[in-house]
Image (cartoon, grey):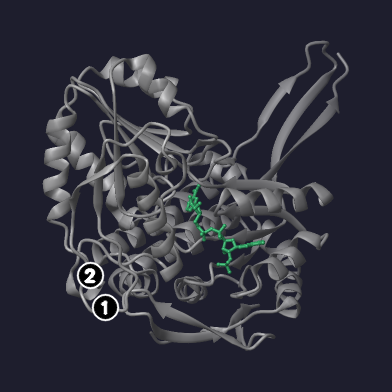
């Protein structure tokens, strides 16, 4: 990987205040690059730059903001393979997953380039007469963005693009496992013409100090966070102190429902995407597979054959599945598996992992005989284990699907569309894939119910998250 790896403030690359930290390749456990470790002084300098750039950026013609976003889309597509290789290197996901992520990320820049020029308002009169109401939308101000490692490009793009389209300036703290992709996006934004101070990136191993500094700074008016529910709760408490506008994209625990009249081959193909994309390290990952008892044997056999055939290894070898993000994640996933087996579950199918590798590999696994109350069904696995639970009535599977505090994604495979939609509407999840294993779409409102989050990203509403609504109540004598 080439290019600067420093703190990025005011379109300049500067050494971090707190030395450096290492970014490691999870496929080998070896160092990729040491990068600057931002400190509190950098966090404040980033807000200084974002606040100084705000008045000009927010009043720039929407078309000009849109052109910069559109150019960023084009540059990401130009560099798709290079960016994909970078994501694969620092995150470990397969090259096809990584390149797919770049395309998905670029689409947010294109989508919000188009939305930037379409922000309308409203005009009306009050029921009592005598006034005219003019509703307008304004950028909320400097926005703090905090992103996780599992989609290092997409999570940044899904926040930067709508924020800039809305007229906000931003300070970004990428996950410390994957800051390199954020640097690459910053470089492309500069090449696309983003003015100094509009986008600032502070990598750091001291997330709480960086983000805490932003949450306490009166110039920061927005927090947009993607990550675990636990950290989201911490940030919501901090946001309460200053009543900061908050968008939270948090953890998931997606149910994957297969009915007795489902097309089993389609359900298996959907499960391979919903469960194993990115090695199961997606917030939308199918966490628990609820398969009707009449089709469970066929589904398990067909899914098992595909899982056992998965190649696990480094991205550059063209593997289907890469390593998990850290050695700690491997240990946690083994602990969940051991707990499930102790509760009565059985490994039905498994793929081999590379021998003699220092990489953080975990074998893709299909688990059967999983009790409905097993810990693995209630915890976010974030690894390539597919626990299968059987059911008999629709009411029973709806109750099982909703027996969680999470409500991000869900999947339903059913032969009769109305049955699929009835089940989908009954499941408490912000996004439901009907007969498909992928819900992500820049044009759709991505987000969760319950403890999976507040707010939505993508679609028109993704830009509204970065705007305040104002109305002018105009005296209108009759
Ligand atoms: P995480 O531990 O919550 O970290 C997310 C980000 O928060 C990282 O940049 C992290 O920095 C930072 N952070 C950690 N502690 C913080 C603190 N005290 N104050 C402020 N920031 C802090 O989550 P993760 O392990 O990276 O990501 C996995 C989780 O994200 C899963 O639960 C997954 O479901 C969720 N996720 C949700 C969505 C969605 O759209 N709903 C999408 C993707 C992932 P460091 O890296 O430096 O620790």
Q: Can residue 399 be seen here?
A: yes
The quadrant where ligand 1 appears is bottom right
Between residue 344 and residue 50, name the one nearer to us.
Answer: 344
Q: Can residue 153 be seen here?
A: no
Above or below, 110 against 27 in this view is above
**The label number, if any, that marks residue 357 in the structure image:** 1
Q: Which of marks 2 and 1 is nearer the N terminus?
A: 2
Q: In this view, does 55 lie to the left or right of 64?
A: right
**The label number, if any, that marks residue 136 in the structure image:** none
Assess mark 2: CB under 8 A from ligand 1?
Answer: no
Residue 164: give x, y in percent of width and height: 58, 58
Instruction: Give the Cα distance between marks 2 and 1.
Output: 9 Å
Residue 423: give x, y in percent of width and height: 36, 20
Residue 334: give x, y in percent of width and height: 37, 58
- Which corner quadrant holds the N terminus? bottom left
Q: How crowded is mark 2: few (under 14 residues within 10 Å), some or many (20 or more)?
A: many
Residue visible at 36% across and 45% down? 342
Q: Name the residue under label 2.
A: 313
Assess mark 1: CB under 8 A from ligand 1?
Answer: no
Residue visible at 60% across and 60% down? 146
Q: How many labels does the image show?
A: 2
Above or below, 135 against 304 in this view is above
Q: Is residue 229 left or right of residue 292?
A: right
Residue 98: give x, y in percent of width and height: 31, 64
Residue visible at 35% across and 72% down? 83
Between residue 390 and residue 434, name the one nearer to us.
Answer: 390
Disc 2 and disc 1 in contact, CB within 8 angstroms:
yes
**Circle 1 sits in a helix, a strand or a loop, which is it?**
loop
């Amino acid at each position: 990987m080439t290019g600067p790896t420093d703190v990025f403030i005011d379109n300049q690359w500067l050494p971090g205040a707190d030395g450096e930290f290492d970014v490691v390749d999870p496929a080998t456990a070896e160092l990729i690059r040491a990068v600057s470790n931002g400190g509190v002084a950098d966090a404040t300098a980033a807000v200084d730059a974002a606040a100084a750039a705000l008045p000009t950026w927010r009043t720039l013609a929407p078309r000009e903001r849109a052109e910069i976003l559109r150019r960023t889309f084009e540059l990401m597509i130009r560099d798709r393979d290079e960016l994909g290789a970078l994501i694969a290197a620092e995150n470990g996901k397969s090259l096809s997953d990584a390149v797919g992520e770049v395309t998905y990320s670029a689409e947010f820049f294109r989508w919000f380039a188009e939305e930037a020029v379409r922000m309308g308002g409203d005009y009306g009169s009050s029921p009592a007469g005598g006034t005219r109401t003019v509703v307008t939308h304004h950028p909320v101000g400097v926005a703090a963005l905090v992103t996780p490692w599992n989609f290092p490009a997409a999570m940044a793009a899904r926040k930067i693009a709508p924020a800039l389209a809305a007229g906000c300036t931003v300070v970004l703290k990428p996950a410390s496992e994957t800051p390199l992709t954020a640097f690459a996006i910053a470089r492309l934004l500069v090449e696309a013409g983003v003015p100094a101070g509009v986008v600032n990136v502070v990598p750091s191993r001291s997330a709480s100090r960086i983000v805490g500094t932003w949450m306490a700074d009166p110039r920061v008016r927005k927090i947009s966070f993607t990550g675990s529910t636990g950290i989201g709760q911490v940030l919501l408490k901090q946001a309460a102190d200053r009543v900061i506008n908050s968008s939270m994209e948090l953890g998931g625990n997606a149910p994957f429902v297969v009915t007795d009249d489902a097309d089993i081959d389609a359900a298996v193909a959907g499960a391979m995407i919903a469960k194993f994309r990115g090695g199961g390290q997606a917030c939308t990952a199918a966490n628990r597979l609820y398969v009707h008892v009449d089709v469970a044997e066929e589904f398990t056999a067909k899914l098992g054959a595909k899982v056992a055939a998965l190649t696990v290894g480094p991205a550059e070898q063209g593997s289907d599945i890469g390593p998990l993000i850290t050695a700690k994640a491997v240990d946690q996933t083994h602990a969940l598996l051991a707990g499930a087996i102790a509760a009565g579950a059985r490994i039905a199918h498994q793929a081999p992992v590379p021998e003699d590798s220092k990489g953080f590999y975990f074998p893709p696994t299909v688990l059967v005989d999983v009790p409905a109350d097993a810990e693995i069904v209630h915890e976010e696995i974030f690894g390539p284990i597919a626990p299968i639970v059987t059911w008999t009535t629709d009411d029973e599977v709806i109750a099982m699907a909703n027996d969680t505090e999470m409500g991000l994604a869900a999947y339903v495979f059913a032969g009769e569309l109305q049955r699929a939609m009835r089940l989908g509407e009954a499941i408490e999840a912000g996004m439901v894939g009907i007969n498909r294993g992928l819900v992500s779409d820049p044009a759709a409102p991505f987000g969760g119910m319950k403890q999976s989050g507040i707010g939505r990203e993508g679609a028109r509403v993704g830009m509204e998250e970065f705007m305040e609504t104002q109305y002018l109540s105009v005296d209108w004598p009759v």
